[in-house]
Image (cartoon, helix red, strand yellow):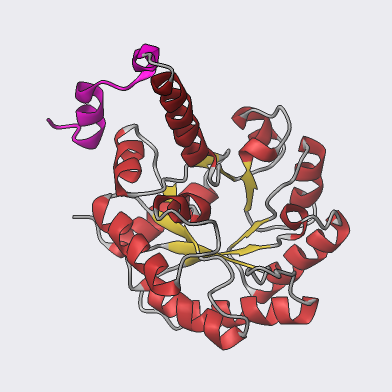
Amino acid sequence: MTTIRELAQRFRTLHEQDGAFVIPNPWDVGSARMLTGLGFEALATTSAGFAWTLGRLDGQVSRDEKLDHCRAICAAVDVPVSADLENGFGHEPDAVADLIRHAAETGLVGGSIEDYSGGADGYIYEFDLAVERIQAAVEAVRGLNTPFFLTARAENLLRGKTDLDDTIRRLQAFEQAGADSLYAPALRTLDEVRQVVSSVTRPLNVLGPMVENASVDELADAGAKRISVGGALARAALGGLFSAADDLQRGGFSWLRGAASGAEITRHLDPLH
């Protein structure tokens, strides 16, 4: 059994080695185990994908449900797991620090905190508060008994505020506050990726599917260190469900041609089977 310290070291090494690595986002225990069986070296949770498994929208999951979800995925796989911890389930810095302490107890080796409030009337936190929240998370990490790799997220671009300069300003402040890695979801071009990479020194996570027509190799060449996919894999799975259901409602079974076999599923869930 791999220890949490060994997993944490493996996760940090992935960020320190040459090139970029892909960190896919499972939405439940089954998809986590299958992605591990397919050979991925680390996983990251998706807040949207998990919410959909509960029949809810992104942002409608409670703190306890999130922590239970993280605990279940960490227990099911033997690779490093980082979590989308949303806004820390509280606006104040103390709430963020408290969540980090509880998240570290689930088996996670890392997690991200964003500067977006969430909720029906969501907004980007004012700059100073956003930085204070990351400072509180960093202090909480330093007080842990096990390593925890903190990612700070600047949500401007994902939330309709197309101000790359302000996004970079926030990422630079988060770096100064002590975040281990940085993330600006919804960078749209390789030039934007390069601009952010040249403005910071910490590893940059890039939401790969949102960078127009970019491959993993091109993202790596642009300076991305970690490439995640957010809820895209969950959406792809749901797209298959919708397509199959439409064909079934029309009386057909052609959708079975693209279905995974029971043997294939077994092989990825249990490579020793």
**Residue at (74% x, 74% y) in the render:** 125
Q: Position of residue 237 (x, y in %)?
A: 44, 34
Q: Report the side of 222 relative to 45 (left or right).
A: right
> Does the magenta stretch mainly form a helix, a strand or a loop?
helix
Q: Report the side of 140 relative to 161 (left or right).
A: left
Residue 111 falls inside the magenta stretch = no
Q: Position of residue 110 (x, y in %)?
A: 46, 63
Nearer the observer, 173 or 153: 153
Quadrant location, the N terminus: bottom left
Write down the quadrant of residue 259 in the picture.
top left
**Residue at (79% x, 55% y) in the render:** 160
Residue furthest front as drawn: 250
Write down the quadrant of residue 215 in the picture.
top right
Q: Position of residue 269 (x, y in %)?
A: 23, 36
Q: Report the side of 69 relative to 1 (left or right).
A: right
**Residue at (55% x, 57% y) in the render:** 58
**Residue at (38% x, 73% y) in the render:** 64
Numbered disc total: 0
Write down the quadrant of residue 35 in the picture.
top left
Quadrant location, the C terminus: top left
Q: Position of residue 67 (x, y in %)?
A: 38, 68
Q: Is residue 202 above or below residue 218?
A: below
Q: Is residue 130 above or below residue 12?
A: below
Range shown magenta = 253-273
Nearer the observer, 2 or 236: 236
